Image: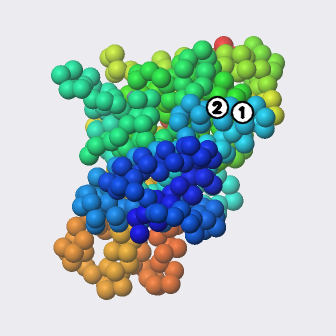
Amino acid sequence: MILDTIDNLILYAKYHLDLSNELDEIYTRNVLLNELHLNHPNELFNYKDEDKMKNLVVPDTLIDELNDYLVNTLHLTNKEAELKYTKIMGILTKSPSEVNQTFKGIYQRFGDKEALDYLYNLSISNYYFQKTKVDQNIVWSTDYPSKNIEISINLSKPEKNNKDIAKLLVKPDPSQIKYPKCLLCLENLGFAGNSNHPARENIRVIPLNLNGEKWYLQYSPYGYFYKHCIVFSKKHSNMVINEDTFKKLSDFVDMFPSFFIGSNADLPIVGGSILNHEHYQGGEHLLPVMKAKAKKEYNVTVFNDVKLYKLDWYNTCLLVVSKNKNHLINVATTILNAWRNYDDYVNDIISHSGEIMHNTITPSIRKEGDTYYLYLILRNNRCNEEYPDGIFHAHPEYHHIKKEGIGIIEAMGLFILPARLVRQENEIIDVLKNKFNDEKIIKKYPDLMDFLGTINELKVDFDEKSIHLRINKYIEKVCQNILINTAVFKDNENGNVGLDKFIGGLKL
Ligand SMILES: [Zn+2]
């Protein structure tokens, strides 16, 4: 059986991973035999499953067969088996430099979209991007007349909390060697993995030059949206938002106009989950804020080829539009630098607590033809007594749905929610069907404690047929409110006057 699997892996690699050379085929088969503690292959390579392997879209069945052999015959633990089959998929994949060569060739001959497709398909074929798992995520979009948001209940990603993320910024103990330093370091390329670091023999990255610096592109293993990529610096250094960020982001869309790209903010709470390695996120998907309409136009007098708008969006998002990259970056930098030190006590915006900085921006950019669209979401991460987790963060009454930092993807309107919600929805339905009282609910389902208010709302006119839809609508409303929580200038009199005053004070 395992010998058939080896034949099939070789066939699969011929059709999907470019294993076309006869010498490489013999060599690779022997490497696989050794990895799997086998002395010889099938006597006759009859390749009976050739058509099946040719048409295999994802390698899941092969992985299952490998896993079965590793666990049941070689008696590996599940984790060890995972490390081993990842290694095997790495062996079947062309080397990083060969993949890069092919990517470059396709880029030059056909363009950015085709080259990005090549890397994307390769990442699916070699099981780096586990598409079957990602496709199981529960994804939907609201059906509001405007300002729609997208929601994805992510079944594979663990939930993190802001305090642990902030800890990553603290200098590590120098006596402990951490290699690779983090999940985004280039040194993950080919890394075998261990109990707390994933195996990365099958990852492939593309080198880029962004504003004269060495950066790399890879796909995200989580795939929050279509062709979700991560672009990371060669240096393991903290996230930063400054003029160079705008230069690097716009360099990226010059190279890959079919993708948008954006950066998480550089501060905890309003930033993403990895603050200690400078990186961006992008993809072919248009995030909801990119479909928002302009609500107001501001005058830009310094350049007549730059337009500046406030968007009709839940949080405070400015849009800078221009065909002129330098002018665009100039305006964005003026806004960023002024915002870093801007206080507006009426709107509770305080830029510093002593030396500690609170104001930052979540930027993202896309290109249509030769026009750049640069989105700047104004952020502030200050906490006070009333809101110890953040004034402009999801307020406590919404933490049962989302308590992690509201990073770039959520701020732009795509909510990644924790897998536990699927279980909790079933528990809520059970509670409603059986008319449990609060005491019984907490006894049977302790973590529904924070849902008691929600359950009381859903009790009214409970109907089993419509309950799923009602729970979804409830989640949508919470996501909307969280986005409003993150608005530094709320959509009210004080907020609107405040934003106009901020923009009016800029020398634009
Ligand atoms: Zn790193």
Picture quadrant where residue 187 is located:
top left
Badge 1 crowding class, 10 Å Cα cut-off, few under 14, some 14 to 19, many 20 or more, is few
User: Where is mark 1, residue-wise?
Assistant: 105
Mark 2 CB within 8 Å of ligand 1: no
- Left/right of residue 414 with respect to residue 372 in the rendered view: left
Q: Amino acid at mark 2?
A: Gln
Using the image, determine if residue 452 lies above or below residue 346. below
- Left/right of residue 381 with respect to residue 57 in the rendered view: left
Query: Do residues under tags 1 and 2 come within 8 Å of each other at their CB atoms?
Result: yes
- Of residue 423 and residue 462, the one placed in the foreground of this image is 423
- Left/right of residue 370 with respect to residue 312 in the rendered view: right
Q: Residue at x 35, y 66 (%)?
A: 68
Q: Amino acid at mark 1?
A: Gly
Question: Is residue 289 visible to us here?
Answer: no
Picture quadrant where residue 1 is located:
bottom left
Badge 2 crowding class, 10 Å Cα cut-off, few under 14, some 14 to 19, many 20 or more, is few
In the picture, the quarter occupied by the C terminus is top right
Q: Quick one: SS at disc 1?
A: helix
